Amino acid sequence: MAEATFAAGCFWGIEAAFRRVEGVTATQVGYTGGTTDAPTYEQVCSGRTGHAEAVRVSFDPGLVGYDELLSVFWSIHDPTQLNRQGADVGTQYRSAVFFHDPDQEAAARESKAEQQASGRLHGEIVTEITPAAPFHPAEDYHQQYLAKHGEDACSSTIRR
């Protein structure tokens, strides 16, 4: 098994999108990229912890490659919006790839360049590509939120 971590706005919709990918064995929503140890949802929403709402994806590389996960990532949000996705505004909603090793970093940078050159986006990609930082799982009620409450609860932010 391998891990990948992505931030692309509200973590509910991002988690739901990755859970549909064959080869993804588990997902967990949480907070990463900030300075507060063990932050709460309320602290992250304040914008003062520096964390992003993110999804940690466990996957079987024999069934799905990291490049395919990157393709899903680019397709489910607007990477040209700085610190926001749709109506969700704040640094916690930033677009970021948190790489776990040099191969993931290289793949993410190449993929970002390909996306920018593709012409499908209207603007400059602002997605951060940064080393994976400590990941703090979100509160239980956030885990698989859309599976529990209906997939359409967050559909306006999912671009897939």
Image (cartoon, helix red, strand yellow):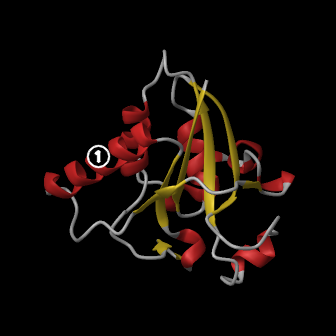
Percent coordinates x, y for residue 83 in the rendering: 48, 76
Q: Residues within 10 Å of mark 1 (few under 14, many from 20)?
A: some
Split into 4 quadrants, where in the image is the N terminus?
Answer: top right
Residue lying at the far right of the rendered structure: 140
User: Residue at the spot x=21%, y=68% of the render?
Assistant: 122
Residue 114 shown left or right of residue 94 in the figure: left
In the figure, residue 69 lies in which quadrant? top left
Residue that numbered label 1 is attached to: 111
Residue found at x 82% / y 69%: 40
Q: Furthest-top residue in view?
A: 62
Q: Position of residue 7 (x, y in %)?
A: 53, 58
Residue situated furthest front in the rendering = 102
Left or right: where 70 falls relative to 122: right
Q: Amino acid at mark 1?
A: Ser
Q: Nearer the viewer, residue 143 or 91?
A: 91
Disc 1 element: helix
Tell me which residue sits at (33%, 69%) in the image: 80
